[in-house]
Amino acid sequence: MLVYGFGVMLSIGQPREKMGFQEFSQASSSAVLGSKQTTLIAIDIEGAVASPSVVTVANDARVQDAIIAAGGFSKDVDKDWISKHLNLAAKLTDGAKIYIPKIGESPQGNFSDSEGLVQDSSKQININSATESELDSLPGVGPVTAQKIISGRPYTSIEDLTTRKVVNAGVYAKIKDSIVAY
């Protein structure tokens, strides 16, 4: 109240334009908005989307956000495959690749059935996008450890599994050649 009173007293006789309200509101809003900055990540999205390309999204984005950034699904998208295999709520990681199949395409081999994220050509499992059953198929990994891996996402490297104590050194030694993190 006291500060407001001094402001009113100082502004007496000055035109309203010079009171500086606009400057104050801009400064206060930028201080509030500037307190949390969003980091962007790049995602390569190809296939049956309106604008296949590398898109940038917020670091906490989901598959659906990348699809929207690419202009949404194209008219020739395989809606049946999407409904059965693509988890639109899956978190993305920087450098991920998403391929959305067109009607008549039979995605196999390099695709992760759960999310449409491309896997390494040597059939390694991406710990950032694999399903619980895919992780469970790894030696020494059961349903509980698979869920711990999923809960700890995203990973920047496979070594994060040991540094974050998600798996012990013995399990890591068994799976390190079968996994990737991107």
Image (cartoon, grey):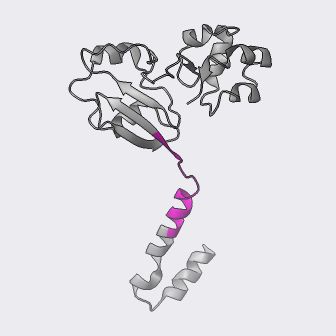
Is 30 part of what is drawn in magenta?
A: yes
- Give percent across and percent down for residue 153: 60, 28
Check the image and name the residue furthest to the left.
Answer: 75
Check the image and name the residue furthest to the bottom.
Answer: 13
Q: Quadrant of residue 31?
A: bottom right
Q: Quadrant of residue 51?
A: top left
Whether residue 150 is visible to the viewer of this picture, yes or no, is no
The quarter of the picture where the N terminus appears is bottom right
Locate residue 32 relative to residue 140 in the image: left or right: left
- Give percent across and percent down for residue 76: 22, 24
Is 88 part of what is drawn in magenta?
A: no
Front residue of 158 and 10: 158
Locate residue 133 relative to residue 78 in the image: left or right: right
Tell me the residue at 38%/33% (across/down): 45
Front residue of 33 and 1: 33
Tell me where the magenta segment starts and ends, as one range. 27-42
Examine the rendered structure and indicate whether residue 37 appears above or below residue 61: below
Front residue of 37 and 179: 179
Examine the rendered structure and indicate whether residue 42 appears above or below residue 8: above
Check the image and name the residue furthest to the front.
Answer: 122
- Give percent across and percent down for residue 127: 59, 22
Locate residue 136 relative to residue 112 in the image: left or right: right
Tell me the residue at 28%/16% (across/down): 105
Q: Quadrant of residue 18?
A: bottom left
